[in-house]
Image (cartoon, grey):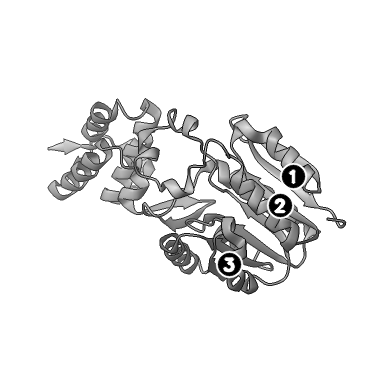
């Protein structure tokens, strides 16, 4: 017989080299809840609950996958972002809490009456988490999203359906805008907001990252050339110069090491009032800038 308490012990013993104790407890809690259909309250209140053989097999199977470093979100094929359910697989990045802060920033500005109408474009949408969360919380705005990956767009569309969010998804390579003219024409004339969480991890950063990220999450959505770490910010800012309406807003999630450089990049392109904001961990992680009417 195996109890909930035994399962927690198994997870701690087998995952000690991969995660810290707090992370192991969170993963074990999520796994038990998913496999056994127990609430978190029941799991914590009744650790001596005896599990069925079927439940134990399910938990053991997931633990074996976790031991390889595979993220629990990919194993379960789902996660949560901004209080909403999302499907995920290795074609898309797993949504991060820091990105929720970026979404909250946009909603706090656009939802206070400052933007009664208009449209939003999410560049490099991945799972669609930003686009879907914005559409659900700002339903009066039109939302479009682009990505270079057809596989990612399939997941994004599934997440839009799952959350009943009306979003226009378009396959588009932001680094090759001149060859994407037909796709650009689908995007309409101008946007009130352009937002992006683009690739920004350098090879130097990669050496410091956990293997469950570098070995499983899509490199196309993570890494940038060491010699040009701002390549996506530069391209998206150029796009925004053309596609943002006057006084429209550009939002970025950023690599904390390049905050001041991105502020300068935006200022050099004529954007005004750039604001660098820290995340919950106190790291420079997001930027907002405004398109000048004279750009």
Q: Quadrant of residue 209?
A: top left
Where residue 118 sits: x, y (%)? 73, 67
Q: Nearer the viewer, mark 3 or mark 2?
A: 3
Residue at x 73% of width, y 39% of height = 263
Q: Earlier in the sequence, mark 3 or mark 2?
A: 3
Answer yes or no: is residue 104 visible. no
Q: Secondary structure at mark 1?
A: helix
The front one of 279 and 41 is 279
Please identify the quarter of the rendering in which residue 120 is found. Answer: bottom right
**Residue tagged by mark 2?**
250
Q: Which residue is mark 3?
A: 180
Residue 64 placement (x, y as % from top left): 21, 40
**Pointer 1: what residue?**
266
Quarter of the image containing the C terminus? bottom right
Question: Callout 2: 10 Å neighbours few (<14), some, many (20+)?
Answer: many
> With 247 as the anchor, is 106 left or right in this view?
left
Side of 166 where 15 appears, left or right: left
Q: Which label is found at residue 165?
A: none
Q: Position of residue 55 (x, y in %)?
A: 19, 48
Marks 2 and 3: in contact by CB < 8 Å?
A: no
Distance between the alpha carbons at the discs numbered 3 and 1: 23 Å
């Amino acid at each position: 017989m195996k109890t909930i308490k035994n399962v927690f012990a198994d997870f701690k013993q087998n995952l000690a080299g991969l995660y810290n104790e707090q992370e192991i407890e969170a993963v074990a809690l999520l796994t038990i809840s998913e496999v056994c259909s127990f609430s978190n309250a029941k799991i914590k209140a009744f650790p001596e609950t005896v599990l069925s053989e079927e439940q134990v097999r399910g938990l053991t199977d997931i633990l074996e996958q976790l031991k390889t470093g595979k993220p629990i979100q990919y194993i379960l094929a789902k996660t949560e972002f901004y209080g909403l359910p999302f499907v995920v697989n290795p074609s898309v990045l797993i949504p991060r809490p820091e990105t929720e802060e970026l979404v909250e920033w946009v909603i706090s500005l656009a939802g206070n009456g400052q933007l009664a109408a208009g449209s939003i474009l999410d560049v490099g949408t991945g799972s669609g988490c930003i686009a879907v969360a914005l559409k659900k919380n700002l339903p009066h705005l039109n939302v479009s999203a682009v990505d270079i990956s057809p596989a990612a767009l399939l997941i994004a569309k599934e997440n839009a359906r799952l959350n009943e969010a009306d979003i226009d998804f378009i396959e588009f390579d932001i680094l090759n805008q001149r060859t994407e003219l037909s796709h650009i024409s689908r995007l309409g004339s101008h946007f009130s907001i352009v937002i992006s969480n683009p690739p920004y991890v350098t090879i130097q950063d990669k050496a410091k990252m956990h293997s469950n990220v570098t070995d499983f999450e899509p490199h196309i959505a993570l890494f940038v050339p060491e010699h040009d770490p701002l390549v996506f910010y530069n391209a998206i800012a150029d796009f925004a110069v053309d596609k943002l309406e006057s006084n429209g807003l550009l939002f970025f999630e950023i690599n904390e090491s390049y905050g001041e450089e991105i502020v300068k990049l935006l200022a050099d392109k004529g954007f005004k009032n750039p604001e660098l904001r820290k995340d919950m961990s106190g790291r420079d992680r997001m930027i907002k800038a405004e398109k000048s009417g004279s750009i």
